[in-house]
Structures are given as structure tokens and as C-alpha cells.
Amino acid sequence: MTERHNTHTLCESADVVVLGAGPAGLVLGILLHAAGIDCVILERASRTQVRTRARAGFLAPNTVEILDRHGLADGLHRHGRRHGTCEFRTQDGRFRLDYGALGQGAQHHVYPQQNLVTDLLTHYLDLGGRIRFRTEALAVRDADGNRPSVTTREPDGGTTRWTARYVAGCDGRYGAARRSLPPGAVRHHRYDHGVTWLGLLAEAPPSLDAVGYAIHDRGFAGHMARTSEVTRYYLQWQRGTPADAWPEQRIWDELDLRMGAADHGPLRRGTLLERGVFDLTCDVVEPLRHGSLLLAGDAASLLAPAAAKGANLAVLEAEMLAEALTDALTRGDTAGLDSYSDRCLAHIWRAQEFTGWMTRLLHAPPDPDQDAGSFFHAALRRSRLASLRTSRIHQDWFAENYVGV
Ligand code: RFL
């Protein structure tokens, strides 16, 4: 329903207003629409930006099951690849873990996030779903009542006030949903691993048929396949240094050095399509609900990308939230909404725990007692890696956590 309020402000409504068209918002929008719920997705970016933003690539079996259950995995099955090996490299050598054959024998699907988002968007639009691009949510108001509203800035500069029964904050870490939580409404647990990565997207085929984790005196380097033409690399980076501080040649030389190219073969070089610097920080909002405002995906919890969990949690939470909202709006049954936060937080803390473990395997934590501390932590990391290389029980534990959410 649209109503002209004055020359600049429109009033519109939907039972559920979803903020953000990432994996969380789109899966939620599709499932609500399929259940006959009146919903709209409001997205700050343009359609092209949404369809081309390269981020995740490793999808867990549970994520694929959810997408399969709702008929959303055709593209992934057609163009994605199964993946089940990772390789750890140090200056002393390397070893591989065929994690797909360990634990419960589960593998990842490698499918770039922008392709998944494009598939989800196409599906949502084919269903007749409502979405507004270039529409930025500015604030969520009255979330503690049963008629919350969202104010948006429209592409033409005007504003719209959306009224709703529920607002789903799927607009990431810096979105309006988090910003609108009144002081004291939730607890915000933050942790900074004290490490910064330079994330790179290279127009180059993968250099190894495994996820590569290199632990080197000069810092961490990582390799993750995306497609046969594009590969993601990471370099541990000096905090505060801009992404463009080094020329391409220097970046490739450093990747070669840390990944032990002299011993294990050179990396396949190509143009760097994208560079981004990000600090390995993580956080959890608790609870994930304030009245009629509910959080999902990165808006609920941010994870360092060391263990590739964020997009997987986003899809899981979106399915849980869709079921809970459908029960509430179609049958007046709010039990699912009441337990939504606790059920999600159990998965979130488990993913945070494993991500923290991975981060400490790849990096020494910052230590005020520099010299003694760095020796101590380097020794702990070597011991952790030795255990992973030699203990079948440890390997099974790793495999189960690496592909699980
Ligand atoms: P998204 O994908 O960030 O989407 C949020 C959407 O909200 C929009 N938005 C707003 N819209 C309206 N009004 C506002 N005020 C708004 N503010 C923001 C944004 O434009 C955007 O479209 O969040 P979502 O849906 O929660 O999904 C989360 C995932 O995107 C994220 O967790 C993953 O990308 C994390 N991640 C990985 N996760 C994995 O599971 N496997 C991986 O292999 C993996 N690799 C990665 C990653 C994240 C990375 N970055 C971003 C550091 C690799 C990298 C480099």
C-alpha cells in the first residue's frame, strides 16, 4: 500500500520489511514470499552491485541442504565444484588433510557468493517478490512495539516510511538494524584478533587443488579456489597500511615466499581484480531480537573469514527466521520467534569457537610481552599443527567443524 504523506515522504507498508539483499535477506525474502507472507526487501546498493560483489565461496553441506530443500541450488549444482582438501604449509614442510574423507565425510561446495546471490535474486523476482534497490534504510523505529517502522532514503533523495509487523535486519555489520538498537537493549560481544588481512581476488586459475594455509615467519598467506579462472588469496598485512601500498609484482613475490613456492612450485599469477584490507575482528549481538526487530547474518554476528562460516550461518538463520515469522503471521504462534535467538546463538558461538581456533592456528595472538610471548605462541602453534598432522581424532574433529555450521 502506498500513500503520499507530503511532497517528500511516502508511506508504504508490508508485514515483514527485510533490510538487505545479501544471502540472508534474499533467502528470507524467498521463503516468506513462498509462504504467502507480504514482504519487501530494501537494499542500499544497486542491482548490479548486489550481483557482482565477490566475497564467500565455500558453502557447507548444511547450506546446500537448505538451498536444495527450497529449490534454490540448481546453479550451485550445475556450476559449483565439490571440495574436500586443505594443505598446511610451514617453513619446515607441508601436509594435506583430505577433510572430505574424515569426520562425517562431508565436503564443501565451491560456488562464488555473487553467483549464489544472483541465483537467489532471479528466483525472488520470478516469484514476483518486491525489492527496492538503491534504497538505504536510515533507521528502524518503535521496534519495542508491535508496529515498527523503517525510514529509507530513496534514489531520488526523498524519504519513505515503511510500517511493518516485523523488521528483519539482514543488512550486515554496518547496517541500520544494528544502529537502531537502543542502548542497553542487547549485549554486544566484540573481539579483535589483532590481525589484519589483505584479501585479493586474482584473475588466475587456482595454484593448488586444495585450500592453502601458509604459516610463515613473515606472516600468514592463504589460497582459496573460486572458479577455474579466479582465485582468492590472503596476505597477513600491517594494520593501517592501505590496500594499494604494494605493486602487484611485490604482492605475488610475497605470496610466493610465504607459500614456499621455491619448494612446492610457483603460484599461477594473474591480474589482481580486487584488493581489500580487513581486520580480523568478530562480534556477536545477544539476543538477536529486540521486540519486532530480528537480526540475521552478519548483522547478528560477524566472523573472521579464516574458517568460511559467515555466509553459511546467514543462510541457516534466514531459514530459521522465515519459519518463525511464518508461524507468527499465519497462525499467531510466536514460539519460534521466542526461541529464535537462543537457537541461532548456539550455532553462532560454535562457529565463533572454531573460527577463533583456526585464527590462533594461523596467527600468534598479540602479546604485550613481545619476545617471550612470540616464542611461546610460535611453539604452541607448531604443537597444534603437529597434533593435526598426526592425530586421527584431532583430524576428525577438524573435519567435522571445518565443514559444519
Ligand atoms: P551481506 O552479504 O553483507 O548483505 C547485506 C546487504 O545489506 C545491504 N545494506 C543495506 N541495505 C539497506 N539499508 C542499509 N542501511 C544497508 N546497509 C547494508 C548491503 O548492501 C548488502 O547487500 O550480509 P549477509 O546476507 O548477512 O551475508 C553474510 C555474508 O555475506 C558474509 O558472512 C560472508 O561473505 C563471509 N565470508 C565467507 N563466508 C562463508 O561462509 N564462506 C566463505 O568462503 C567466506 N569468504 C567472507 C569470505 C567474507 C569476506 N569479506 C567480506 C571479508 C571472504 C571475504 C573476503
Image (spheres, rainbow, N blue to C red):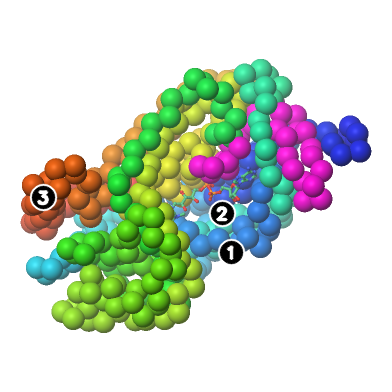
Q: Quadrant of residue 7?
A: top right
Distance from disc 2 to disc 3, alpha carbons, whole Å, reads 52 Å
Badge number at residue 72: 2
- Picture quarter with the N terminus: top right
Q: Earlier in the sequence, mark 2 or mark 1?
A: 1
Side (left or right) of 44 relative to 316? right
Between residues 157 and 109, which one lies in front from this camera angle?
Answer: 157
Q: Earlier in the sequence, mark 1 or mark 3?
A: 1
Residue depicted at 44% across the width and 38% down the height: 301
Between marks 2 and 1 in the image, the one whose residue lies nearer the viewer = 1
Dot 3 falls on a residue whose secondary structure is helix
Residue depicted at 19% across the width and 44% down the height: 367
Residue type indicated by callout 2: Leu
Residue type indicated by callout 3: Asp
Q: Can you identify the residue that label 1 sits on?
A: 52
Between residues 20 and 317, which one lies in front from this camera angle?
Answer: 20
Magenta stretch bounds: 149-176
Side (left or right) of 141 relative to 154? left
Distance from disc 1 to disc 3, alpha carbons, whole Å, reads 44 Å
Dot 1 falls on a residue whose secondary structure is helix
Q: Earlier in the sequence, mark 2 or mark 3?
A: 2
Q: Can you identify the residue that label 3 sits on?
A: 371
